Image: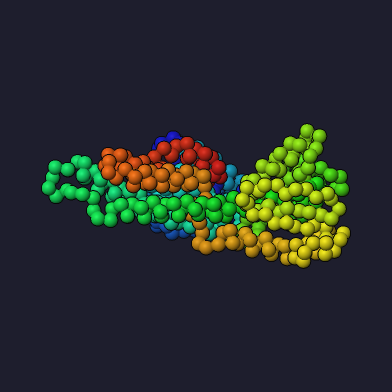
Amino acid sequence: MRDGDTIVALSSGAVPSGVAVIRLSGPSAGPLLVTMLGDLPPPRVLKLTDIALAGDVLDRGLAAWFPAPHSFTGEDCAELQVHGSPAVVRALLRALTAHKGVRLAEAGEFTRRAFESGKLDLAEVEGLGDLIEAETEGQRKQAVARLSGHLSAQITSWRERLLDARAEIEAQLDFSDEGDVGELPKGFAQSLTALGEEIEAAIGTVGRGRIVREGLRVALAGPPNAGKSSLLNALAKSDVAIVTDEPGTTRDVREVAIDLGGQLAVLVDMAGLRDTESKAEAEGVRRAMTEIVQADLVLWLEAPDVPTVELPEVGGRVLWRIATKADLRPRWSSPGDALSARTGAGLDQFVKRLTDFAATQTAGEPALLSRERDLAALQAAAGATREAQQVLAQPELAAEALRRAAHALERLLGGMDADSVLDRLFSAFCIGK
């Protein structure tokens, strides 16, 4: 970011469209609005007006003025709602960027300025990014909860309790010769234990949050020709996978996302498991085994017309045995487990079962923790808190452990060492956000 620049961008969708929103942020936002409208509208009030530059009326639309610090970025901001004509948008952007110190915004730059001015912390920024990318109702709820600052409030509370505990210990060190400073308060060790347990409990929710944010990974596994690709096509309601009666057709991993009652599920089709002399198919089998270990749910498919294969070790993952191709031999498996992708028999019941399972994995209030960064920060904080409990008899070591615990939480909110995280995060944002 170049300090002092005013940035401008189309913040709505691609044109042509019914309405196009052009956003400005920076010191020139107010003067530019005066140049275009003749005066500033009342703050945070939409004004219907002609929008003109250099005496040329470019369009008639709505304008809004957001003086600092009461704006999204914390800077002076303006928004223009004009007709979504490519010609109008091009003319406005060209005319605005012709002014000195005004340039087109970079990806995510409005949000980055909001972060740098303290309008959003890093956890809230990540929530905003998740909300923009949300495809299901579950993802939307989780993103809104994070963006609304619920996680930030919890992290701040834990951090303040750690700082208070550290202050108590350092008071012993700094003022041990003063008469009014004695031993640690009664219940100090218990309160520190309770804090550590709260952080540990939050760590346990990361997996649930990850499933909502990234999707429930469902591995379609089994021997060749067990009907994995046919089931994938049936669930996706599209011919996304090639289906033939030749064993070993699928050799790579294919992912398809579907919505299960508001929860995202990622179906993973893969090579059939068997011994093979083909190098390509052997690599497919190896990748399939990797996916099985990483999946949240493994569907082991068996069919009446294919050789049985020993079930793989699924590493504690949930595994369902599914009887496919029920149209070839009705009732060859126990009732409720059989289905046919060709005729659709049993498919509705299976989808309901899958939907119910997805709901159980994400039940309750939206999980605020969903990223590897969240997990790493909380594990570091919990570990340092445990260490402080173990060395309370050595105040210097306990104080240092509590300092590290608080700093781990501060990094989660972007209070320190955030540059590398920011660069990755904002590069994924769209222009104008």
Q: Residue at x 71, y 54 (%)?
A: 299
Is any atom of residue 50 visible in this view? Answer: no
Q: Indicate the quadrant where residue 28 lies.
A: top left
Relative to 138, say whether 112 is above or below.
above
Quadrant holding the N terminus: top left
Q: How is the image coloured?
A: rainbow
Q: Residue at x 34, y 47 (%)?
A: 389
Q: Nearer the viewer, residue 369 or 222?
A: 222
Q: Locate residue 430, reporting x and y percent.
A: 56, 45
Q: Residue at x 78, y 54 (%)?
A: 302
Horizontal side, residue 68 vs residue 267: left or right:
left
Q: Locate residue 368, reporting x and y percent.
A: 48, 54
Query: Which residue is situated farthest in the top direction here?
Result: 279
Q: Locate residue 234, reporting x and y percent.
A: 77, 57
Q: Nearer the viewer, residue 200 or 47?
A: 200
Q: Locate residue 342, reporting x and y percent.
A: 83, 58
Q: Residue at x 75, y 62 (%)?
A: 337
Relative to 279, say whether 365 is above or below.
below
Is any atom of residue 167 visible in this view? Answer: yes
Q: Nearer the viewer, residue 118 or 212?
A: 212
